Structure formats: C-alpha cells, structure tokens
Image: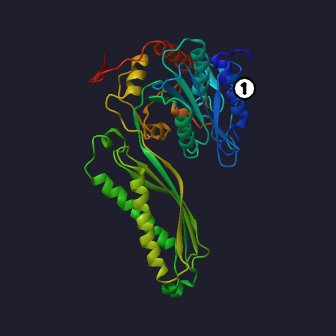
Amino acid sequence: MTELSALEILEKLVSFPTVSDRSNLELIDWVESYFNSFQIETYRKYNEDNTKASLFAHVGPQIEGGVVLSGHTDVVPVEGQDWSTDPWVLTENNNKLYGRGSCDMKGFDALAIWAMIEGHKSNLKRPLQIALSYDEEVGCIGAPPMIDEMIKKLPKASMVIVGEPSTMLAVTGHKGALGFTTHLVGKEVHSSILDRGVSAIMNGAKLIDWANQQNVSNKKAEQTETAKLFDPPYTTLHVGVIKGGTAHNITSKDCNFEMDIRVVSDQKVDFWIEKYNEKVKEIESEMKTVSRDAKIIVSNRSAVPGLRPETNGEAETFVRQITGDNGNHFVSYGTEAGQFQERGYSAVICGPGDISVAHQPDEFIEKSQFELGLSFMKNLIKKLNQKKQKYLTFGGSFC
C-alpha cells in the first residue's frame, strides 16, 4: 500500500462514519491493512458481540519501557445538527479542516498512525505503540479490555500519551466520571390512600435529595490539594433526566432517572459506587415494608477513573520536553488516561485541537494545530531514537 501523509490518513479516517452506535470494523480493517502493508503486526480486542474492535500494535525493539499513543475511533452522531459541509468528507476552508472527528479525535489518530510508520522505518532504540479503542464516547468502555490485552501481548510500555484535544498542552489531571441509570418500581394505588402504595417518584426524589446533600457537604468539606486543582474543587452529583408516573392522582409505579457523579481524581470511583448503592438499599428497604414487589434497579452506565497528577511523572516530563509547555493544565472532561494509569502506566493528555469545538456541527481542527501535532510526532520519533534517560523535575523546570 502506498505510504500516506498524515493529512491523507486523516482524510481516510474521517470518511468512516464510526458513530458509537455503529460498528467501527471498516476503519479497523483499513488501519490493519495499512499497517500490515509495512509488515507491522497488529492485534485486535473485540467487544462481546464482535461488532467492534480495538486495535493495538508495536514497533521498535521488543523490550519494555516504550511509549503508547492512545486514541479512540468512535465519534458522536451528526443527526439533528446543521452542517454546512459533508461531515464524512474532510473539507479544508480558511485553514480549518472540517469533518466529524477531525478534532475529537481522529486528528490525533492520524498523526499516531503516521508516527508508527515513521517509527517502523527508523532504527528506534525505544519502542512505540499505538492503541485505538472503541466506545470512548459512551463511557470509555473499550479501553480497559484493550489495555489488559496489550499487557498480555506486548512488552509493557512505561508511559501513554492520550491525544484528546488539548491544543498540544500537557494536561495532567481530570475528574473521574460515574453514570448510573436508576429504575424505581413502586405500587400503584389511588393517591387518597397514599399509605397503601409506594410512589416510585417520591422515593426517587429521596435519592435525588441525597445527591443534593452530598453536593452541599462536599462543598463545605476541606479540600485536598489535588481537589483544589479542579473547578469546582470537589466531587459533584447531578441528575439531568427523570421520567415517571401515570397520572396526578395515582402513586407512580415507575421512575427512571440518570445520575452522573464527577469524582475528584484523588478519590476512588468505587467509593462513590458503594456509597450510592448503600443509599439505594436503604430506600429500597423502606419501600418493601409496604410492598414486597417494590424495588430499585441500578445499572452502572460508566465508571471512568480520574487522571491523578503524578509527582515527577515520566509521561508529563517526556511531553513537556517536546512541547516546552511548563504550565499546569487540568480538564473537566473524562478520558481513557486514568484507565491506563490505574494499570501502571504513567499518563498524560496531549493532542491537537480545541475541545470547545468537539461534538458540534461543523467540527474542525485548525490546520496549524494539526501541523503542530505533526511536529510533535517528528520530535517524538527523534527522542525514541535516543537512549532512555531518567529525568528530574524541579518547580516546573526540567533538566
């Protein structure tokens, strides 16, 4: 297969409509074929029904301590959005590259694929790996099984660069994210004999009130140094959707709502899972005193760990030496970085593009950002051709 420029690779990736509710296998097939044409071995990790797959690969010496370039292949839908260009055709206009996923995050994916080919052609002294996941946009579902498989199949890398759009700044922390779908099942009676029924909505309101109480107490609590890095500097709980009830004079049989929890990165998401489930059991027990058939069903939509700032982090130091960025940067959106970090990788976020234009109609990446990302990859290859060094950090400066 003919070697492509990074821009040509981006054009190809955008052409695949890999919305999260569809298969990404056509894109994965193309990437695999492209790598195989250069004798780069690839590996897949499928989802349970084999409709989607993650892909990962390794170039350079078969030793541990390499660098992973991590991206996701799925994008958000375009339905209902007013696009002025075809979202599945990369279109350049006024030094902007338009297309769904051009910013979030096929721009980085294209650069990572390009870097893998360049690394393969070079005599790398330190390995380079790529990890392309599925279903990041719906809860970072595809990354954990992919990472676990990478650890089994490849020499373990020591650091990962997650290329979410950060305008090529080194982002070293983000909150974790939990998502619960909660379904309360009550008992219908005429509301004039309320004590003989179980209102699913009113009991659901108890859980929502509990969430409000947690927000108040979290805000009042003394904040840790890590928490102070975020805005707001504490864990928050929020219900954005609620449905239920049949009529105003019937105790509601059903109530469904969506609870999201944004967890500061020095707290475990498991702590909040347990805490929520304890409250659910308490309220469910009260409901069952009236009706044994009353119940609360909780489905965990997502559980994404936060990215904890690292002391003398290898990934952060590595990226800062390439970019020259010494600022402190933290983001509110979740990524797969924490999933790598909890499996023993040093992790940092650094990718081209501005998150503020992601998911919107006429999504774009500035051409200058894409070129900055390409320059980053060229310098990364140069560094991987050098012997691995140990780095010390002092007050934001590196030596």
Where residue 132 appears, as percent x and y from the top left, is 60, 33
Residue 91 appears in the picture as rendered: no
Disc 1 residue type? Ser
How many other residues sit within 10 Å of disc 1, few (<14), some (14-19) or many (≥20)? some
Residue at 49 percent of width and 84 percent of height: 290
> Residue tagged by mark 1?
33
On the rendered structure, is 398 left or right of 336? left
Q: Nearer the viewer, residue 63 or 328?
A: 63
Locate the C terminus by quadrant. top left
Where residue 59 appears, as percent x and y from the top left, is 57, 21
Above or below 98: residue 119: above
Numbered disc total = 1
Q: Nearer the viewer, residue 126 or 273?
A: 126
On the rendered structure, is 132 left or right of 166? right
Q: Of helix, strand and loop, which one carries label 1?
A: helix
Which color scheme does this rendered protein use?
A: rainbow
Where residue 36 appears, as percent x and y from the top left, is 69, 23
Where residue 126 appears, as percent x and y from the top left, is 48, 18
Above or below 128: residue 212: below
Locate the N terminus by quadrant. top right
On the rendered structure, is 339 left or right of 87? left
Above or below 369: residue 174: below
Residue 369 appears in the picture as rendered: yes
Q: Nearer the viewer, residue 252 or 273?
A: 273
Residue at 33 percent of width and 20 percent of height: 391
